[in-house]
């Protein structure tokens, strides 16, 4: 098993969905991803928080074995704050407030012990900051990156530089279309591969995820849930689950990447069943296994004995 | 192998997509579904056309072994006409014109030979007309029905009567949400099962399809295509492929229904690669098999040796 470095936002979120509302709860991409990854691997977290970030959330990560040497608390500072509201089918969300606060000056310096880690997830941050992290990592590190529509629009050159340096790019379907400039997702994935990464994962929310490389194409639906409460953090839990699994297996062949996407899917399903990281903290090893096996069964259909189709009708 | 009755519109369509434009080409739910079903089974078509419906399209169906005794040509009448335009990502379409013409008085009378068929697909028509067909079928017939948002809104009672009489209901995701009154698709599927059918299939366009019954849940992505030209008829090709496969196997257990969804997925993929029924007419047996096997590989991920997850990190 190898170590995983996770870099990104650590936040307080106010979220409203048709199923409830929470105020200033623990969130942020690095928090979700670290909670997810630490289910499977030793995780090293890089982020910045203010005085207002609750110690119990950091303790929770520590209890799961996460190394918080890369987390800086700024005295007198306030944590990144995001407020948003989801519509009826949880597909679209409206951002009501974004306060960068201490995250505005986030300059991730990796503790020495992190620099030799074999796996890294760069959550959605400005591409220049992602690049600064890549510079600190060993060349052999398997690096996954996320991004967002804002950087595709406003920081395209820096983002392309990031993509040329990472091993796997995570994008949602709209971002993949926007980045590639084509509405066709199969085409878009190919075009993102041309930008550098060996693997592209397209996240489709409740419709699942697709993994594409030059010689593999894998696609699965999401884990079916009768009660989705809050999709916040689903993508980061997915990515954290993926990278945590890869680090645990310490192998990045198609077989393990496919399994990693399935683990990410299952871990994201636990995330969205409650607000904040509550769903993730409640996910036990037994339930993780059970959902993985259920997901395998959900997509299974049998081979044909083709002789039957040859016979005349 | 059993016979399949297919009832629905036979139309002329004018379609514009970002990839081209066609004027008054052959279309209609029954035409797409019959073309698809006749790849696998003996198909009996019930529909109505005007003088303007091209004979070559009927000949094409005949050549595939479809029985057209249930197709009425109204002298002096004009065929159902639909015009529509698709947006950038082919997800949304705008209807520019709908002229029911001879379809306005569609009163499907099944030829005697059709009434003992074991499989039937009722494409999207007014629920009362679907009911009139159900009345003519034998009780043991496995009936699949489609519908649309208009009937959910305006003919709910009649639609509920249809649902209480059929074996399998096909809905797209928006229709399932609308019919069940819940944004959650897993919940919506359960609620549609409560309305009567033993199986519900939720069509999600490029995101795949999900099959739900009381004791089964199956979900697969769509077949990936670098060049989608026109989504018109995809859902009907999918349904036709499903019912044609079930009739060929003459078995409706979960194993065959899962395979039927996979066949429907593959056949729909051929449909959307060209305008009108061109993609379907070009689909050979070899390509059908190849895509079925590719789809199986696309969703495959391996079981875990769980012992590894038990060891301490």
Image (spheres, coloured by chain):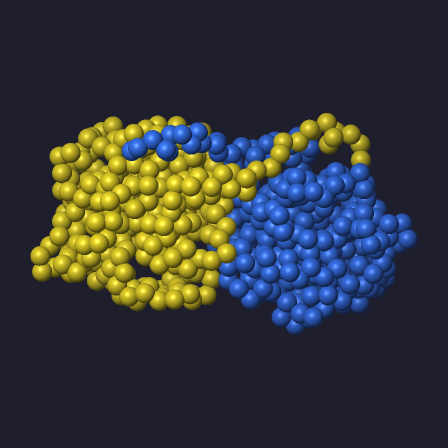
Chain colours: A blue, B yellow
Lateral position of residue B20 relative to residue A185, left or right: left
Identity of the residue furthest to the left in this view? B75
Q: Vertical placement of B26 versus A238: above or below?
A: below
Lateral position of residue B3 relative to residue B76, left or right: right
Residue A28 seen by the camera: no
| Residue at screen point 85% across, 58% down | A136
| Residue at screen point 69% across, 59% down | A196
Residue A308 seen by the camera: yes
Lateral position of residue B206 relative to residue A157, left or right: left
Q: Vertical placement of B138 versus B131: above or below?
A: above
| Residue at screen point 53% across, 48% down | A206
Residue A195: where, in percent of width, then height?
66, 62
Residue B93: where, in percent of width, then height?
38, 62
Q: Quadrant of residue A186?
A: bottom right
B128 or A254: nearer the eye? A254
Lateral position of residue B297 relative to residue B64, left or right: right
Residue A140: where, in percent of width, then height?
81, 51
How many numbered callouts? 0
A307 or A288: nearer the eye? A307
Residue B142: where, in percent of width, then height?
29, 32
Q: Quadrant of residue A192?
A: bottom right
């Amino acid at each position: 098993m190898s170590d995983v470095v996770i870099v990104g936002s650590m936040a307080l979120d106010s979220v409203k969905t048709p199923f409830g509302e929470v105020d200033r709860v623990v969130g942020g991409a690095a928090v979700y991803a670290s909670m997810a990854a630490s289910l499977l691997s030793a995780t090293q977290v890089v982020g910045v928080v203010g005085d207002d970030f609750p110690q119990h959330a950091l303790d929770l990560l520590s209890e799961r074995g996460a190394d918080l040497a890369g987390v800086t608390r700024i005295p007198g500072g306030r944590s990144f704050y995001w407020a948003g509201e989801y519509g009826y089918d949880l597909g679209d969300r409206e951002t009501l407030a974004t306060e960068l606060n201490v995250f505005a000056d986030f300059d991730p310096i990796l503790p020495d012990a992190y620099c030799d880690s074999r796996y890294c997830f760069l959550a959605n941050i400005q591409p220049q900051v992602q690049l600064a992290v890549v510079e600190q990592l060993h060349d052999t590190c398997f690096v996954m990156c996320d991004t967002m529509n804002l950087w595709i629009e406003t920081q395209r050159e820096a983002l392309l530089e990031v993509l040329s340096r990472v091993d796997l790019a995570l994008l949602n379907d709209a971002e993949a279309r926007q980045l590639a400039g084509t509405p066709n997702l199969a085409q878009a994935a190919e075009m993102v591969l041309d930008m550098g990464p060996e693997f592209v994962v397209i996240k489709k929310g409740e419709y699942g995820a697709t993994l594409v490389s030059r010689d593999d194409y894998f696609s699965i639906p999401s884990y079916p849930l009768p009660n989705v409460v809050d999709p916040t953090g689903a993508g980061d839990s997915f990515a954290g689950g993926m990278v945590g699994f890869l680090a645990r297996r310490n192998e990045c062949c198609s077989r393990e990447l496919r399994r990693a996407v399935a683990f990410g899917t299952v871990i994201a399903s636990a995330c969205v069943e409650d607000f904040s990281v509550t769903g993730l903290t409640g996910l036990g090893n037994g339930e993780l296994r059970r959902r993985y096996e259920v997901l395998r069964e959900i997509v299974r259909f049998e081979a044909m004995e083709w002789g039957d189709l040859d016979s005349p009708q």
